[in-house]
Every structure is written in structure tokens, then in C-alpha cells.
Image (spheres, coloured by chain):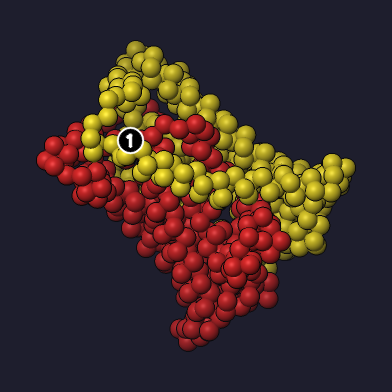
Amino acid sequence: MAGVVRYHATTKKQTREKHIDESLVVRWTLISIAVLFITIMIILPLTVVMTEALKKGASVYFAAIAHEDAMSALRLTLITAFIAVPLNTVFGVLVAWAISKFKFRRKQLLLTLIDLPFAVSPVIAGLVFVLMFGAQSYLGPWLSEHDIKIIFAVPGIIIATLFITVPFVAREIIPLMQQQGITEEEAAVSLGAKGFQVFWRVTLPNIKWGLLYGIILCNARAMGEFGAVSVVSGHIRGRTNTLPLHVEILYNEYQFSAAFAIASLLMVLAIITLIVKAIVEWREEVQNIHL
Amino acid sequence: MSKRSIIPGFRLSIGISVFYLSILVLIPLSIIFIKSFELSLAQFWDTIINPRVLASYRISFVTAFCAAIINTVFGLIVAWVLVRYQFPGKKIIDALVDIPFALPTAVAGIALTALYAKNGWIGSLLEPLGIKVAYSPLGIIVALTFIGIPFVVRTVQPVIEDLEKEMEEAAVMLGAYRLRTFLRVVLPTLYPALLTGFTLAFARGIGEYGSVVFISGNMPLVTEISPLLIMTKLEQYDYAGATAIAAVMLIVSFLLLLLINLLQWSMNRRMTANS
């Protein structure tokens, strides 16, 4: 409630007192610097993807996207996300439940563990799985004996993506659930709600928008991961190529228009992610005003 | 503490979470250290002090540091402008700040290369001035700056939102000018957030691979970053070398992560102490 009131107070035009706000010159200089920075660093790169992709005409653009290798890369990217996102969503909800609804020791340690994949270089993330499952690893001889291929094959790509995307859902909903406290859940339990019902009927409605954003962010990263996947994939065309890896191959073969065409697909994915984020934030604001 | 909560599912959720994290994160990462212990100390040392490896560390750290500094300065300005001022297009600028989180790094890499290459929109403007960005260390800084934009903005923004105008007003009443108020009253309260944002951007920059490989040109000793060198060693089946380089990077990342956690912990304490 206090937040809402303050929000209205700051948006209202107030008579400016001397020295309390910056002078108009300073104000517009800062705004110009900020806008210029974002324009050069973000808007121009996004624009260049589209112009490069369409440089040689729409036919080249669509040919690149409809190409057999692009389609198989798209398929593998979708499969990877389809496995990694649900698993990490379930994990994210479970770990957020434990952290936000209970008191226990070593909670900070657990939080740090969840963040680890953020801090590790994607290349190292790929490397650890090569060391674990590669031909020279402890498991290597056993795996080859049983004809199981993980590295330079699809399972490796999925595992590396799982590792990279561990924190996304958890990080998004933990603060949200901590903020909401435990009174509603306790009330539900004392009124007779059982186990999963408490989560489904009481907690979920409160966190659904944050959860949705976490999932969509996790998905964007799962589909867009490059470094880790690059290490474990082996770059076998049509077999172990995801969309970002396909971009690299096309680019290194100097097929720039095709590379940018595929890149534009991934860019659309990023923009959709941000639109969902905007909707989620707008929903939360509406929810706060109604409270 | 000792009173058991009536909310169900603690054992199940904590059990599965810890199991999942152990299998997917903890055990795989510990493999790096186990494998490095298999190397003799001399072997390990020889890999690390190789001039090419040392150069890659230097390049990775210096470029990530520069990019994080750039992001701290501009991130503060962007966050300040987004919270305090009204201007057309503000919502769009605010949304665009998150693009580097959502855009695949490979896409960012080729886009920035196209922009800053000799014949690119920006590269062609800088060429007459004798500034070469793509395929030089400067290009790495540009890529890492792009990658790090959200970190500083998103850590500083909420803190500026929570600033109490009364404090600034009090400073004015006491006769301080705006710049002085900003430097003496506002900025100190932003230091922890700025430092956290800086560290996050720095940590991310050290490990970044996808956006850099396209724009850097990957010349050994000049623009070859450590993650790329790990990649090269792997392609040559030099697993020991790759592991040794990675172990050093991992230790640095862990230290940075520890620093971030300490910073956030002290920030939280300060915030709860204030309220």
C-alpha cells in the first residue's frame, strides 16, 4: 500500500525546489548519454542483424531458414529446450519452496550453489562434461563398451544445457516467495489443505507471473546457449548442431546472409522473452494496486 | 528454529534439490579439481606459466575489467535516468537493457562484428581516425560491455528507487549544492550496489566466450581469451592443459562469487538495519 502511494506522489508534477533536482541542462545531458549508450550498444546491433539478414533479399533469407541443416538444428534446439526447461522448472520450484518456506542452516550455501553455473565460464561447463563422459574419462571405457555416446552427441548437448540453465527459474521465484512469507500457507494447512494442494491453490497463484518469466528466461538461455554446447557437440552437421552453432558454421563459411537469417530467428526469441517480461511486470503492478 | 513447521514438503523439496544440484553441478565441477590433482605440480605449473596462457589470462582480465568499468559508469547513468526522469521512449530503453540477457551470445558476437568491422556502420566511422575495434582487444571490450550492460543497471536501479528524497532535501537545506549532494549523500549509498554490479559484470566477462570469438580475431598473445584457449587445447586433445587453465579460472570465479555474496549479505543487513 505504501508503495502505491509513493508511486503516485513521485509521478505528480511537483514544483521544483532549487538544488533538489538537477538543472534542465544536466538532466537532458544525462538522458542523452543514456539513450546514446543504449542505442549504440543495443539498438544498432539488433538492427544490423535484420539488415544483414535481408541484404540479399527475402528469397535468400527464407532459403537459409528452410534449409535442411537449419531445420535439423531447429529441431535439436527445440528438443533440448523441451527437456531442459521442464526439469529446471521443477527443480526451481522445489528449491524455492525449501528456501522460502523453511528455516534451516547452510541456506546461504545452497543459494551460492544455485548461482554457481552463472559464475562458471560456459566453456568450462562444457569441459567438465567432456572430462566426465569423454573417451578419456573414468566413465569413458564403460560408456563405449555399452555403446552409449554422450559427448559429441545429443545427450551431451542436453546435459550441458541443463547445467547452464539451472539458476534461472529458481533465481526468479525465490525472492518472490520469500517476500510472500508463509502465513497464507500456514492458514491453508490449518484449514485442512494437504501437501501439494497448498502449493497449487495457495502459493502458485501468487507466483505465477514470476514463474512464467523465469521459465521463459530459462527457455531463451536453453535455446541460445553457445559456449558450453559448442564444447560438447562436436559440430556434426544435421546431427549435433543447435541453432546458435549453426549460426557459427554459416558465419565461418562466409555465408553471412544465411548466418544472420538464422540469428534473426534467435533474436525474435529474445524479443518475445522481453515482451513477456514486460507483460509480467505490468501484471504485477496491477496486482499490487488491487492489494 | 526447533519448532517444526506445519507446512509440508520440506524433506522432499530439500532432498531432491540437493541431489539434483550435486549430480548436475557439484560433482561435475569437482572433476576439474580432481583432474588437476592428477597432474604433477610441475606439469600444472608449466601449463600455467606458458607465455600464451599467461597472455590469455591477462587479456581476459584486462578486457573484462575495462568493460565492467565502462558498464559501471554508463550503467549508473542509465539507471539514474530511468528512475528519476521522464522522457519519451523511457519504457523501451528500460526493456532493451535486458536484451543481453536474452539474446544468444553468438548472435551478439556476429552483430557486433558486423557493426565494428572496417566496412561496418560504426567501424567505417572509426577507420579514418585510425581506431580499429573488430579483431583487436578493443573489440573484446565492446563485446564484454554489451554482455555486462544489465548487471550494473539492474542492481543499481532498485537502490535508486528506494533512496529517500528527504536525505537529499536535508542536504540542500544545510546548504549543499546539487553536485555536492550527489557526491556526498547519494553516491555513497549506491557504492555497494555499484560494486556488486561491477563484480557481476566482471565475473561474467572473464568467462564469456560466444560473443568474443567472432569479434576478437583470436590471435594468440594479442586477442586470445582464456576460454578460447581451453577450447583450442580441447580440440588438440590436450585435456590436461585445458583442465589446468580451467582450474585457475574456476578459482578466480569462486572468489568473485564469494565477494558478490558477501556484498549482497552486507547490503541486505544494511537495508534491514535501516527499516
Q: Please give the letter of the chain rendered in yellow.
A: A
> In percent of the image, x 33 and y 54: which residue is there?
B195
Residue under label 1: B161
B138 and A209: which is toward the camera:
B138
Q: Colour of chain B?
A: red
Residue B54, given in percent of the width and then of the height, sits at: 50, 79
Left or right of A279, for residue B164? left
B179 and A223: which is toward the camera:
B179
B20 versus A205 height, above or below: below
Query: In what quadrant of the picture does the N terminus of chain A appear?
Result: top left
Left or right of A241, for residue B206? left
Residue B8, given in percent of the width and then of the height, sits at: 38, 27
> In percent of the image, x 63 and y 67: which residue is there?
B128
Chain containing mark 1: B
A184 versus A67 height, above or below: above
> In percent of the image, x 33 and y 23: which residue is there?
A13
The picture quadrant where one finds residue A21 is top left
A217 and B101: which is toward the camera:
B101
